[in-house]
Amino acid sequence: MSDAILVLEDGRTFRGEAYGAVGTTVGEAVFATGMTGYQETLTDPSYHRQVVVMTAPHIGNTGVNAEDDESRRMWVAGFVVRDPARRPANWRATGSLDDELEKQGIVGISGIDTRALTRHLRDRGAMRVGISSVVRDPDELLAQVTAAESMTGADLAPQVSTDETYVVPAVGEKRYTIAALDLGIKTATPRHLAALGVETHVLPSTATAEELLAAGPDGVFLSNGPGDPAAAGYAVEAVRGVLDARRPLFGICFGNQILGRALGLGTYKLRFGHRGLNQPVLDRVSGTVRVTSHNHGFAVDAPLDRPTGTPYGQVEVSHVGLNDDVVEGLRCLDVPAFSVQFHPESAAGPHDAAPLFQRFVDLMEEQRNA
Amino acid sequence: MPKRTDIEHVMVIGSGPILIGQAAEFDYSGTQACRVLRAEGLRVSLVNSNPATIMTDPEVADATYIEPLTPEFVEKVIAKERPDALLATLGGQTALNIAIGLYENGVLEKYGVQLIGADVDAINRGEDRQLFKDIVRSIGADAPRSKVCGTVEEALGTAEEVGYPVVIRPSFTMGGLGSGIATDEAMLRRMAGHGLADSPVHTVLIEESVLGWKEYELELMRDRSDNVVVICSIENIDAMGVHTGDSVTVAPAMTLTDVEYQRMRDVGIAVLRAVGVDTGGCNIQFAVHPETGRLVVIEMNPRVSRSSALASKATGFPIAKIAAKLAIGYTLDEITNDITGVTPAAFEPTLDYVVVKIPRFAFEKFPGADPRLTTTMKSVGEIMSMGRNFAEALGKAMRSTETKVAGFWTGERDDRSAEQLLDALRVPVDGRLYLAEAALAAGATVEQVAEASGFDPWFVDQIALVREVGDAVREAPSLTPELLRRAKRYGLSDRQVAALRPELAGEDGVRTLRWRLGVRPVYKTVDTCAGEFAARTPYHYSSYDEETEVEPREKPAVLILGSGPNRIGQGIEFDYSCVHAVMALQDAGYEAVMVNCNPETVSTDYDTADRLYFEPLTFEDVLEVVEAERAAGPVAGVICTLGGQTPLGLAQRLKDAGVPVLGTSPEAIDDAEHRGAFSRVLRDTGLLAPKHGTATTFPEARAIAGEIGYPVLVRPSYVLGGRGMEIVYDDATLEAYIAKATDVSAAHPVLVDRFLEDAVEIDVDALYDGTDLYLGGVMEHIEEAGIHSGDSACALPPITLGSADLLKIRAATEKLAARIGVRGLMNVQYAIKDDILYVIEANPRASRTVPFVSKATAVQLAKAAARIAVGETIASLRAAGVLPATGDGTDLPEHAPIAVKEAVLPFHRFRTVEGHGVDTVLSPEMKSTGEVMGLDAEFGTAFAKSQAAAYGSLPTNGTVFVSLANRDKRSAVFPIKRLADLGFQVLATAGTAQVLRRNGVAAEVVGKFSEGPGNVVERILAGEVDIVVNTPFGSPGNSGPRLDGYEIRTAAVAAGIPCITTVQGMAAAVQGIEALRGGEIGVRSLQEIHADLGGVRA
Ligand SMILES: Nc1ncnc2c1ncn2[C@@H]1O[C@H](COP(=O)(O)OP(=O)(O)O)[C@@H](O)[C@H]1O
Ligand SMILES: Nc1ncnc2c1ncn2[C@@H]1O[C@H](COP(=O)(O)OP(=O)(O)O)[C@@H](O)[C@H]1O
Ligand SMILES: [Mg+2]
Ligand SMILES: [Mg+2]
């Protein structure tokens, strides 16, 4: 096994073994606390340009399979694990994770004290990091790290988005058509919608309101995605157009931040973000708690205690993260739009929030009859 | 939703004596529940017959009733206390069954008591296996095909439908009692019979077998606004077919993708909702087909369970504590997670470490018992370990079990061929991990081992990984820091490394080298959130990783070493003493640091000590903890005398390593433990021991026996719980024993004692500080010497001893304590024969009886012992109110109640390979798993209570069957006559009947088992007998009378009727029966009793 080093922007260095592809990579260091679903995580476009530290020690136990990818490829900039599996053990496995990482050129490191690294990021905040199995000198790697572009201000959606529009047909009878703005969409989302009789037209991230509404969809969907929402002005513009058209709109994660900005609310970067499958979110309408799948470094800034006036009428915070009171969902009171910061499509994660897709469908139904 | 306002007084039911399948974990959950409810300002009444629990400490509840856990007695308590609500989901199956009983006989309604946690319908939906399966199907999930059967014929019919093999599962039992797998009709006939008998409702489920599938468990919690969270997933390494309680298990699940795990989670939540457990914890078991992934639901326990205790310790999420809060109305989002102190309990813990649980068995105690692991739980305890990877956790777990081997390569190597080992692996037994390693060593492939064992290949590969590391260590020219670190990272102990590198002069040599190379463990924290939030609770485990999380401290620390896995002879009583030490030392201004590896206990609750190290109790692991704490702040020392034999065995080595050992010194311990040294003690103190000698060969032994005369008592030296002890009547048996015994414990010689026949045995617990003696209590055994002190019933105060005897005992105890140099607790066993006092043994440590004595006399002996260990004196403790100002356990007031301890035995759990029961005869070898306490004004009623608590009430009329050894016939006549006068019908075997008739007792003669049809065994099984008195005769092994007795006793156990095997026991039973007929027996709370004992409660 050849050695590898990991160097953080603040100079802290970890020595371990090369994992996945041999080489050098830089990105934003973030930790993910899920105990399952590494395949979904690796292929989630929202992790583009991020070096993901898995807190669960054993990664790769179930290998990789054909069904669980969330997009066409792995997106993480680097992968940090403690104990990679030596062999896959699962009846669905078609290959081993290391081979797949190598094939897709994902540079990683294993065998380091991932808990120490996680606690460092928790206390000091997410920061830039470099991993290399070729560069031996930490200072040399540190230079590359500090030279790297930081996440704040980064416009990444276009880099992960589809170039051509494509269609995901409804399962069974088609009851609705929607236009989905692909800011980094996961395959689980159209799958959930399709199951509810929704045909999804997936458009590139730079699509305008006109383009989104061209086909006369029953609703518009804003996907999750990577980067700083403040840098995605084009998407904000498109959403304003959709709001003006009073077309039912549902946003997830990055989409929640875009809706927020379209409404004139601010967004800000969290210290180390939320990345896990165990996050409690209070649905303030029903008063129930949902255990939800999270993956966000930015959040919407809105008052929790009262609705806020916006050019599109009143908006209220519909969901709150119980761990730290972060805004986890928005609901417009005067236009047919709502969004959540977490992932109802899960993959990976619990299915508690899946009913939100039904809520989107109900909203489209209402508008139809209105 | 905030706390309910309609409940002010809650009654909690405990789980009673420690049994296989229902052990200390319910003391842990019950104690948490009581504390939580009181902290919420509610009045708590508690009923639990088990005195060895922390939960029955008077300060845990407002009113504590140490009374039998039967609907009758619990009703008495309800009538007296009039609680608003009953919380029965924290006391195991026992509490649940009582709750159902009280509901069905209308008691709850009569007194307006509402069940909280789970209502009766929910309990039934969860516990009734057929109802449950219907629910599973109703939510679109899958379960093995099955049918509930009320007769053996019905069972056979069902088996034809679903096809053999089939699983038999009695309804409403726990720990898989009476269940099993039948491969053919003959087997099913027998097992269905047993099963129907074991089920309180006399039905069994006949079920499609999913043998060999992967087994999983989920621990879930639900609150009254229908929020549901999964606390922990557990994967069994042993496949379906081995009870989860007997399986090696791992948390979190290791071999499921998110898709599969979430499906299991969805089904679990749907089942929980459908069953309708409205608040609290529940446990659901699943089986997954290894090739197709087909998921079936096996069962649910709508209550806190053994697994939920494990899950609580594994995740840091206190399920029982939260369950209690939910029961009184809070919702998960209203409760904070005490580990982070900032986030809510409404979340799902995530682990950044791996947890391994390994069960601990006691087959050696039950000769002839079938050692195969099945669907009936047989383990008596368990250990848990944590590591940053599976291999590290596995290594720690394997050395935590305290069996003869402590991980791979530490025992003799298994030279069998790969083929033989693979065959051996096909039969589930204890220690298959070792077999798997040996098979790999012998050249079997991971796939072959996985196929033969049913272990997932991933786990087998991990064992292969450990092997590779082992090989690297064995073959390296020299041990580099890198290699040593790698070995440690994969869980190898110094002892294992030493086994691989003989030239390193053993474990100590390895440690010296390791320390020199700076290869040391760090300590991580269990924080429920994988580091996402800071943890406030110092709940640590070691790992060979980079960063340690042990915080510096100001106050001096005292480390308390726990007792490791529960086992017969060393159980919850020792945990009780450790927990008391923690409290006492905190009061005295120390930081109490607990080290233990038993997940069932109160001592390993992160709320108990100031710091908790969940670590194996081996010299290496303990020493590293000491070093870590020394680096953190001042360390006053280590207490080794409260956790039983386990920490006692470490005392000398710790001292030699320069660790201050508090209390009685290791040298003193050795004086008492080593036979040679102890003889000197006795000589110096002028005390008598039964004549004895030590032998290493049969001729030597025969010579000694010849000199002191048969019968003799033989045993290996240095044992606890009477391991391998036997009463021997002749040369032949002696020879056989020596042959057997020397391999029982290789190094140690065999001790040969004169066996004192018909002697009264006495147990004494005392405190000594170098000047004063505090005689905590003197217990008189009911059964004569020869029945292990742990298995015999006893009474405090002693019922037949005169004050002269007590004076002798006090004097002897004081001499022993002084000469040995005890500083703290000492337990002595004496035997009185023909007015001569013999010393049987002295243990300079906390004993099994400490909690019993403490509760009977209202004095917390273990707390006092801990304070003496840190230098206080009995005088200063009297002044401080920890001990009574004057007097001690021997001068209790006249009106003091009689406390009777009765042992509870697990015979009904074991069967021979042929499926017969195992013999129930009591002997010098301890066999009981737990005990109960009967408290009342007179001996008779107290004894009757103890019997009701242990076995269900004594009969007050009906038929008694008597068959006595010749030597017992005379002494038994009187009590039997008394029974006849009380109107009992007497059946007896010919010889006994003759003696009885001569003494005016009309006894009907019944044939012995060997005498064919119409014999006594048939009549017992037919339910014609209410109580059996059978004193064994003939020495073990040989046929004839001994065998008859065996058949009679096992029949009694099968029929579930009292079976008394000693004359003394029978005499006591007669007194009990008279007391019961005397009328209404009352109940009294421990607080009331202690109040008028004027007791101190430190
Ligand atoms: N249908 C089955 N086929 C094979 N093994 C089974 C089956 N059902 C249960 N078992 C095994 O028996 C054990 C005990 O069964 P369970 O229903 O959990 O009873 P208990 O109430 O004693 O826990 C399980 O842990 C499992 O290993
Ligand atoms: N010489 C003896 N005569 C009669 N009974 C004895 C004698 N020695 C021991 N016993 C019986 O054996 C039991 C176990 O012996 P003990 O020395 O206490 O072993 P342990 O250390 O396991 O408690 C005692 O409780 C007592 O009943
Ligand atoms: Mg079970
Ligand atoms: Mg003893």
Image: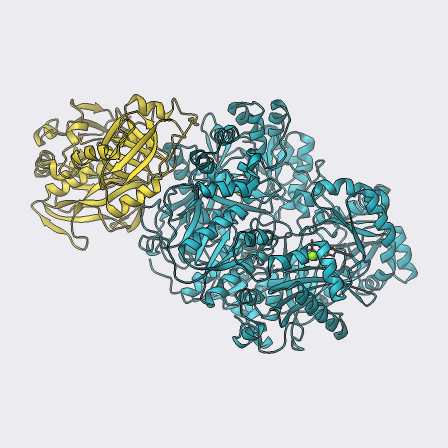
Chain colours: A yellow, B cyan
Q: Nearer the viewer, residue B503 or B445?
A: B503
Which quarter of the figure is the C terminus of chain A placed in? Answer: top left
Q: Position of residue B1005 (x, y in %)?
A: 87, 51
Q: Position of residue B747 (x, y in %)?
A: 69, 43
Which quarter of the figure is the N terminus of chain A placed in? Answer: top left
Quarter location, residue B781: bottom right
Q: Could you tell me which residue is drawn at 43 percent across and 44 percent down?
A: B521
Q: Nearer the viewer, residue B541 or A197?
A: B541
Indicate left or right for A200 with B520 as reference: left
Indicate left or right for B855 with B1059 as reference: left
Q: Nearer the viewer, residue B1022 or B454?
A: B454
Q: Nearer the viewer, residue B574 or A63?
A: B574
Q: Could you tell me which residue is drawn at 39 percent across and 59 percent down?
A: B553
Quarter location, residue B572: bottom right
Which quadrant contains ligand 4? bottom right
Is residue A262 visible in the rendered image? The answer is yes
| In the depicted structure, whether residue B213 falls above or below residue B680 | above
Indicate left or right for A312 with B206 as reference: left
Q: Position of residue B859 (x, y in %)?
A: 58, 70
Work out which residue is located at the far right of the displayed protein and give it: B998
Q: Position of residue A153 (x, y in %)?
A: 13, 38
Q: How many numbered marks have been drawn onto this rendered protein structure?
A: 0
Is residue A195 visible in the rendered image? The answer is no
